[in-house]
Amino acid sequence: MQFLIRRLIRNADQVHDPAVRNAYGRLSGLVGIVCNLILFAGKLLAGLLSGSVAITADAVNNLSDASSSVISLLGFHMASRPADDEHPFGHGRYEYLSGLMVAVIILLIGLELLKSSVQKVLSPEDVSFSWLIVGVLAASIGVKLWMMLFNRRIGRLIGSQTLIATAADSRNDVISTAAVLAATLVSHLTGLRLDGWMGLLVALFILYSGVGLIHDTLDPLLGKAPDPALVQQIHEEIMAYPGVLGTHDLMIHDYGPGRQFASVHVEMPAEDDVLVSHDVIDNIERDLQARHGIHVVVHFDPIATSSPIANNLRGWISREIQLIDPRLSIHDLRVVTGPTHTNVIFDCAAPHGLAMTDGELRAAISALVKTRDPSYNCVITIDRSFVTLST
């Protein structure tokens, strides 16, 4: 691994550089193409010599892996294209689309292998045995183990779900090839015709892997929630800046690996100098970009900290609504007093899947606040949390 990286990738330690990241992707793709074509040729020869549908199925699986590597290679190349007028956020999602294409190919091949394996189960035939076949399968297991470690290491290094999925696919190949090898040895020793059944299991395993890959590649395209650990870290980092009272409405948009954009509301005292608060916000945006590579836009929410009623209510309501659901939180609270009643105006962030309608939630919170003072009239805006923040 180190030999290939040193010889083929310049500035290999600068993994956040798009050019270096693309070089890692090209290297992984080329290694996958070469190794899988060699394995396909060896297993296909072994399958034809032995008449084993299970070995042939495993060979075709390696051919699909080679085609998958080609698509991944093209995906990395297209994803590295710079932003333009029509795609101002870049082309990073090509990497996700290439992964989706790979998954579809795996499913199609799995279905074809399933068909041929069922025919072999219904009409079993004797399988020729040789130690050459055993050697080919054993060597395949060793190569796939190395490919799994290679792709997993690079995938983690550059943060590529495509390469991590490729590593998982190599792991699956190790399992399926080991199963074919076991069936070959058992059939030779016992005379049982297990070839069709093992080919069936390999086909089902390929289909299972394909479904899993489709799920993994569709998630970022559909807008998967960001990593809770990242959300928590961003919250804690923002809270460490002077004058910050709270954060809410954090949204992170994924336009491909290394191409994340975010927006967040930051609460700061309304009584502070606006130029000082703006300077803090600029620092937050710049520092988050430097630390996490995320382009962040911060919205300033002024909070009237000089009102004792508002300050007391803000903390009290934040604690008490935990009795309704511990995932609830409030923000942007202000108080408007009048001769007959006091309006308590705030937003409530509700999680997805809450077993209450917005109207029911407003009524429950209003009833709770009136236990503190019957003259309080709640004006509540319900908004949905886009991220999960631990409390």
Image: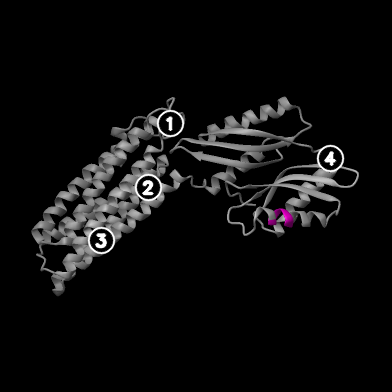
Q: Three-letter amino acid code at disc 2?
A: Ile
Q: Which mark is residue 74?
A: none
Q: Name the mark on residue 164.
A: 2
- The earlier-in-sequence mark between 1 and 2 is 1
Up/down of 259 relative to 164, above or below: above
Instruction: Residue 114: give x, y in percent of width and height.
Output: 23, 61
The reply to whether dot 2 and dot 3 touch (C-beta < 8 Å) is: no
**Closer to the eye: label 1 or 3:** 1
* Cα distance in 3D space between marks 2 and 3: 21 Å
Q: CA distance from mark 1 to mark 4?
A: 46 Å
Tell me: residue 202, above or below residue 258: below
* Crowd around label 4: few <14 · some 14–19 · many ≥20 (10 Å): few
Q: Which residues are magenta?
A: 360-364
Q: Earlier in the sequence, mark 1 or mark 4?
A: 1
Q: Quadrant of residue 281?
A: top right
Residue annotated with mark 4: 307
Confirm whether residue 181 shows in the render.
no
Separation of marks 1 and 3 at Cα, in angstroms: 39 Å
The answer to whether 166 appears left or right of 46 in the picture is right
